[in-house]
Amino acid sequence: MTLTIHETANQAVGAGAAAHANLQSRGNVREASWHWQVDDKEAVQSFAHTTQCWHAGDGRGPGNLDSIAIEICVNSDGDYLQAVRNTAELVGKILTDEKIPISAVVQHGKWSGKNCPTFLRAGSKGITWAGFLDLIRTGTPTTPAPNPLTPAKPVPVSKSRPVLRRGAKGGDVGDLQRLLNAKNKAGLVVDGSFGPKTEAAVAAWQKKSGLVVDKSVGPKTWASLGA
C-alpha cells in the first residue's frame, strides 16, 4: 500500500477541508474520490483506508487500486504551510497505524505524470517535496525554503458524518449517544441504535443549542456537539 499526496488546485476562498469533504458526500461530479482532505485547521476523512478511491489517474493501476489518497487544500484564504505541516502529521500517524514505510509516500505525478502536488513539486510556497518528507520524519524541514513554517499546531482529525435519524444504526449513532451523554447528560445506553430515547435526547439538545428541532442529526447538530 502507498500514500498518494495531491493538492486540490482549488484556490477559491473557503475551499478548505470541510468544503471538499462536502463535495464528496454530495457526489462529486468529476467522478473522483479521495480518502482525506487537509487544510490549515483540520484533517477530514471521507473514506476508510480500505475503500478503493479514484484519484490517481492510472485506471485500474496500483495508484487507484492500492493507495490512500490525501488532498492538501490550497484555498487562498488558508495558510498553505500550516496545511502542509498538518498533512505531514497526518501522514506520520497513518504510516504508524498501517505499518507502512515512508518510502511508500508518493506524489500523484508518480501514477499519471500530472504535475501534482504542484506547489510542493516547485517549492514555490516555501517548502519542497524533500522538505515535506523531512517534516514527516522529524517534524522539521531540513531543506531551505523562502518562508519559515509556522509553529506546529494540533491537528483536529474528524470525518464526514452522515445525517442520522430514527431507525439508524451503527458506530456513528454510538458516537452521537456518547456525545449527548457528555454534553447534555442524556443518560442514553450507547448501543448504536437510534430509537425513541435517542431521538428525544437529540430534540432536547437542539432546543438547548438554539437549532431547528427536527430530531435528525445533520451537519449543524454534529458541529454543535463538537463532532
Image (cartoon, rainbow, N blue to C red):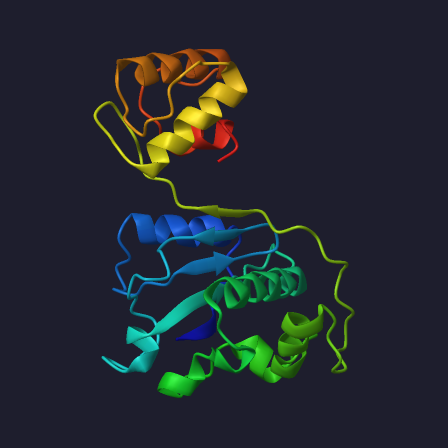
Q: Residue at x 38, y 25 (%)?
A: 190
Where is 121 relative to 7, above or below? Answer: below
Residue 125 seen from this side: no
- Quarter-of-image position of residue 192: top left
**Residue 114 at x, y percent in the picture:** 41, 84
Q: Is residue 186 left or right of residue 88?
A: left
Q: Residue visible at 37% across and 84% down?
A: 111
Which of the 4 image quadrants contains residue 59? Answer: bottom left
Name the residue at 39% across, 14% down: 201
Residue 188 in percent (x, y) is at 39, 17
The residue closer to the viewer here, 156 or 119, is 156
Query: Which quadrant of the structure image shows residue 77?
Result: bottom right
Image quadrant where one finds the N terminus: bottom left
User: Residue 71: in sight, yes or no?
Assistant: yes
Answer with left or right where residue 167 lies relative to residue 200: left
Where does residue 35 sit, x and y in percent of width and height?
39, 60
On the image, the x and y values in percent for residue 39 come to 56, 56
| Count of marks placed on residues | 0
Residue shown at the point (58%, 59%) measured from the top left:
76
